[in-house]
Amino acid sequence: MSYRKGMIRQHGREFGIFHRMLDAAIILLALLWCTTEYETTLPLYYELAGVLAVVVFLFFAEWHGLYTSWRADSLGHEAWAISSIWILTVCVLLVLAFMSKTSIHYSRVVVLIWTVATPILLVLERMVLRFLLRKARRLGLNTRTVAIAGGGKRASELLAIIMGSAWMGLKIEGVYDDSGESASQGMLGQPIRDINTLLQQVHERKIDCVYIAYPMQQEGRIRQLIECLADSTASVYVVPDVLVSEFLHARWTNLGEIPLVSVFESPIYGSHSFLKRVEDLVLGSLILLLILPMMLFIALAVKLTSPGPVLFKQRRYGLNGQVIEVWKFRSMSVLEDCEHIPQAQKNDPRVTRLGAFLRRTSLDELPQFINVLQGRMSIVGPRPHAVAHNEQYRKLIHGYMLRHKVKPGITGWAQVKGWRGETDTIEKMEMRVQYDLEYINNWSILFDLKIILMTVFGGMLGKNAY
């Protein structure tokens, strides 16, 4: 029996609809199974919860792009995305149940089992679908023939990724280059042909995708090749070099009819800004309610163990570089907020005995959840530095002030990756800024949830925090 190459891909839209329906069915069937184990029938309020769960899950899944092609995505990454979206869905349902005072109608056992079982079933579904798709690719149903145009390091890296990821279903036709750089890179034994051969094979429909990997300096060659490939049905991708990659962290926009590339811009704007604020208000309120007893205990301990106020307010830079007051439990015997503030060091005499514990465990940061509800800070974002430190490092580190394109956070990507505490060298601060900018450039609600979970499970504990 013969199969058309790429037949599944040609019906991707129908497959996407089927996949959404399958996810919805799994969510509802999981709830039905959990409920019928404890109830003789499915009560109406459980049916309503199931429908709301499907709507909310599909909304966040669409917003995150969960139903785009998996070809270049790993199962682990997709499993994390599913779990994060489901956690966010459950949080929304809990808030709705609390606000509508209907939580008493639901069994805690049923809700807990449903919360745990649903993401497991959704991930198992993905595993089965991926297995079937790989089987289909072996029959030629879901493969894509690709060509790499250009030489140099980027082309070699791209080739290695494709050859090392057979599950993508990408078949290398060859490397096409007239510049001579491909020969110097070796290209992992792939045949190196000229561009004319590429154009001929593209027009013969032997190639589905073309990856153009010339460096930015060869703009004329890139432009000419794109013009030639425009007269074909092949999908064309330009692989950016390092400089262009920095540009592509930003977004396309328009000024009238003129397209612009926003090089230095935050992705958290418009509707994203609204979602970020909703996230802060919902999660911030829930967390603050949970930690309120602990905060009262810490406040009492601070007051009894050393003289001075319980809270310490320090001026720091917030969104767009505006000065804000950040709250912390006092952990030092001094209240410094001047032009020259030395960072806390190991065995710093200014730090109290209780303060050393609070700083090491980040418990001194808990009052900043009040800053979050005030709108001055976010739960996740670059950590705010003292104004004096900002003025020092902005002159020494390229792109330092780009950290302030978003609200500062209680926790951040740099902190959970280990770059917190004392920065006694420029290199350490540069690494912190690098992770902060990586967070800003790749922000999403799911990224925030990942950082929050990493923080809860030890991400804010560090040997460098004094």
Image (cartoon, helix red, strand yellow):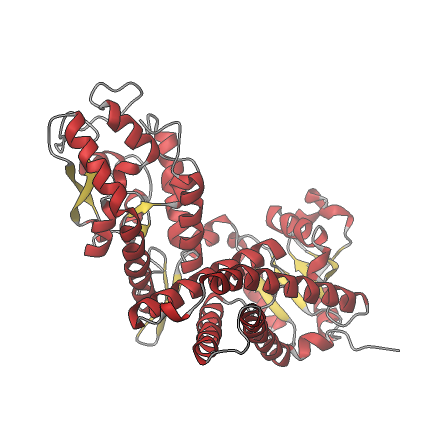
> Measuring 40% from the left and 27% from the top, which residue is drawn there?
463
> Measuring 39% from the left and 30% from the top, which residue is drawn there?
427
Front in this rendered view, residue 300 or 120: 300
Question: Looking at the figure, which quarter contains the N terminus?
Answer: bottom right
Can see residue 74?
no
Question: Which residue ends up furthest to the front in the rendered image?
Answer: 40
Left or right: where 136 falls relative to 318:
right
Q: Is residue 24 above or below residue 73?
A: below
> Measuring 22% from the left and 26% from the top, which residue is drawn there?
342
Q: Is residue 132 above or below residue 295?
A: below
Q: Is residue 79 above or below residue 298?
A: below
Front in this rendered view, residue 465 or 164: 465
Whole-percent x and y of residue 30?
A: 57, 69
Front in this rendered view, residue 295 or 113: 113
Q: Is residue 369 above or below residue 272?
A: above
Question: Which residue ends up furthest to the right in the rendered image?
Answer: 1
Left or right: where 368 falls relative to 195:
left
Left or right: where 223 falls relative to 289:
right
Badge count: 0
Whole-percent x and y of residue 405?
A: 29, 53
| Quarter where residue 123 is shown | bottom right
Can see residue 268?
yes
Left or right: where 333 falls relative to 27:
left
Front in this rendered view, residue 357 or 162: 357
Whole-percent x and y of residue 361?
A: 34, 34
Whole-percent x and y of residue 47?
A: 48, 78
Question: Looking at the figure, which quarter contains the C terminus?
Answer: top left
